Image (tube, helix red, strand yellow):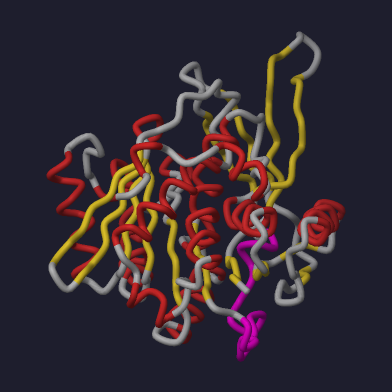
Amino acid sequence: MILVCGEALIDLFVGDDDGTALAARAVPGGSPFNVAIALARLGRPAGFCGGLSTDRFGEVLAGRLTRDGVDVSLAPRLSAPTTIGVVAPRPNGDVSYAFHGHGAADRSIGGADLPATLPDGVRALAFGSFSLAVDPAGAAYLALAQREAGRRVVSLDPNLRAMVTPDLAAWRARLAEFLAVADIVKASAEDLADGFGIDPVDAAALTAWAEGRLAGGARLVVTTLGSAGARAFLRTPRGTAMRAVAGRRVRVADTVGAGDTLHAALLARLDARGLLDRAGLETLSPDDVADALDFAVRAASITCERPGANPPTLAEVEARGASPAAQGR
C-alpha cells in the first residue's frame, strides 16, 4: 500500500456574481486527498492518513475515499471542522486559492493521532501540500517521515500555495527537514519559483536545483513545467541522468488536481513495475524513469481536460498511448 499523508478538505469553486448570489460548487479535495484517490483509480492499493472531521463535510470526504477504494483505517476522525478552500478562476486558466481552516481537523492532527507502527504492507509514504507547513499537523507528519525513512520510500510534493502560506521562511525550514529524508521529490514550476527562487525556464538553474536534492539524498527528482511537460533527474553511479517528456496538447478545462494526478501516477507506475520500495529504487534506470514520467504526464493531461480534480482510471491512461518521444529512451 502507498500511504498518503496530509489534508482532505472541501474546495468551494466560486463563479460569477448574478447580483444576488455567487455561483458556487462544493467539491471534496485537498492535494493528498486527490493523490490517494488517483492512486486507487490507477489500480494501486492506497491508504489515507489525515485528520477527517466528524462534521458533514468530513463524512463526505471519508465516503468519497472509501468508494474509490482508499483505505481510511489510519485516518483519525476529529471533532474539529473541515477546512474550506475557496477556488477562483484566473484569466489564464489557472486558479487562485484561499483557505479557511483555523483549528480545522486536517491541521489539528498530532503525533498521538498517527499510528505508532505502520502495517507491513505499507511500501511507500507520500507527503505534501499545505498541512506540512502548519502545526501540529506538520510536525507530526515530519516525525512520521523521519521515523520511516530508510525503511520505506518517502515521496514529497511541496505543492506550495504562496498566497496563503503566512511565513515562507518557516515553510522553507520545514521543507528542508522533509527534503533531508525524501527519496522522491516532485516539484512544480510554482514551487520552484515561489518557494526556492528558481526560474523554471532556466535549464541550468533547474538542473542545479535538482542535483542539489540528489546530492542531499534523493534518488529521483521530478519537475513539472505545465504545458512544457516534465523533467526527471535520477542519481546513478555515473552521475545525474535526465529524462524529459513533452506536454500533451489538450483542451484545458482547468488545472485543478493535475499536479496531484502526476505525483500519484508516477508512484503508481513505479509501484506496478515493482520499483517502489528500497530495493526497487536502487535498481531504477533512466528508461524506467522515462516510462514512469510519460505515464504520469498522460494521466495529468486527462485531469486537465476535466473540471476540478477528477483523476483518470488506469484504462483511460493506457488508452491515451505513450508519447513517441518517451519510447525507447
Q: Is residue 109 located in the magenta-colored stretch of the structure?
A: yes
Nearer to the camera, 191 or 150 = 150
Q: Quadrant of the N terminus?
A: bottom right
The x and y percentages for residue 216 are 22, 71
* Relative height, residue 239 to residue 34 (above, below): below
Is there any visible trace of residue 260 in the rendered image? yes
Q: Residue at x 35, y 61 (%)?
A: 170
The x and y percentages for residue 253 are 60, 24
* Relative height, residue 296 to residue 320 (above, below): below
Nearer to the camera, 188 or 59 = 188
Majority SS type along the magenta span: loop
Judged left or right of residue 61, residue 263 is left
Q: Residue at x 41, y 76 (%)?
A: 280
* Relative height, residue 287 to residue 49 (above, below): above
Q: Residue most toward the front? A: 328
Judged left or right of residue 250, residue 192 is left
Nearer to the camera, 291 or 6 = 291
Q: Is residue 312 located in the magenta-colored stretch of the structure?
A: no
Q: Residue at x 66, y 29 (%)?
A: 307
What is the span of residues highlighted in magenta in the rendered image?
104-121
Nearer to the camera, 5 or 96 = 5
Q: How many marks?
A: 0
The x and y percentages for residue 300 are 53, 41
Is there any visible trace of residue 225 in the rendered image? no
Q: Residue most toward the top? A: 19
> Which quadrant of the structure image shows residue 211?
bottom left
* Relative height, residue 4 to residue 124 (above, below): above
The x and y percentages for residue 108 are 64, 68
